[in-house]
Image (cartoon, coloured by chain):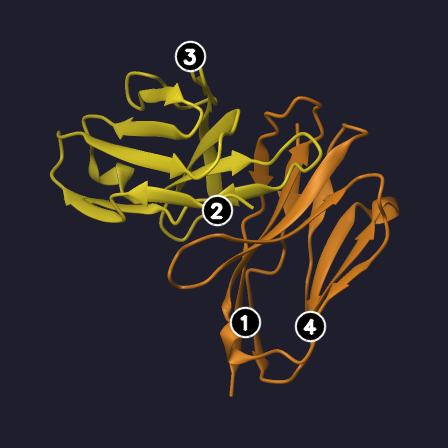
Amino acid sequence: SAVISQKPSRDICQRGTSLTIQCQVDSQVTMMFWYRQQPGQSLTLIATANQGSEATYESGFVIDKFPISRPNLTFSTLTVSNMSPEDSSIYLCSVEGTSDNYEQYFGPGTRLTVT
Amino acid sequence: AQKVTQAQTEISVVEKEDVTLDCVYETRDTTYYLFWYKQPPSGELVFLIRRNSFDEQNEISGRYSWNFQKSTSSFNFTITASQVVDSAVYFCALSEGLTGGGNKLTFGTGTQLKVEL
């Protein structure tokens, strides 16, 4: 299994500001995913980040609001831009296993509160 | 479109009772993967199991067991002799079975399990 870390683990931010969340994996992976979990809700996929190409966003999520970087095979960032209280959520990154093992592992999450 | 339904929003049991968490899925894919995750109050998502659509064998891991039935599109999860530490939200999820990866997960709404003394 992959070991995934995220920074920060939690933050309290003011509306109108931006926060960049980092995701680091202990091994090289092709695909990284960013999910959002709003309070008391399930997880929703924001985007898929493939190294060397633009991230692919799901319906309802746009690059201007959630820009993603994927500079190498072990690292990705998600920025939550121009935040509002509705952005208060847990943001999780995940990675997919190798081609013979499609297990998906999640980072510990970043708990974001926007005031 | 893929869909996962976890009809049980919350279940409360007394320690040592057995409990089954239901999961029903919808997909048009012939190859797909099913997952269960545990999310304790700390918030991290703990991987429990992955099952591919061609493997209908039930699986047992300690006190955990899974019953996969394609005929009813169900992938139920049973905890035997529940313990307080099992208290968490449990998510069932479904992904495509694309070769080459990039399989996005569709999650159910989760079942909150409370195990009391």
Check disc 4 and give the amino acid type: Arg
Q: Secondary structure at mark 4?
A: loop
Q: Which chain is orange?
A: B
Q: Which residue is mark 2?
A: A42
Res. A90 in view:
no
The dot on residue A7 is: none
Image quarter where the N terminus of chain B lies is: top right
User: Residue B21 at what x, y percent from top left?
Assistant: 66, 62
Mark 1 on the same chain as mark 3: no
Horizontal relation, residue B75 to residue A42: left or right = right
Q: Which chain is yellow?
A: A
At a point 73% along the width and 58% down the height, the residue shown is B76
- Decide: is A14 above or below A69: below
The dot on residue A54 is: 3
Q: Which residue is mark 1?
A: B86
User: Residue B89 at what x, y percent from top left?
Assistant: 51, 60
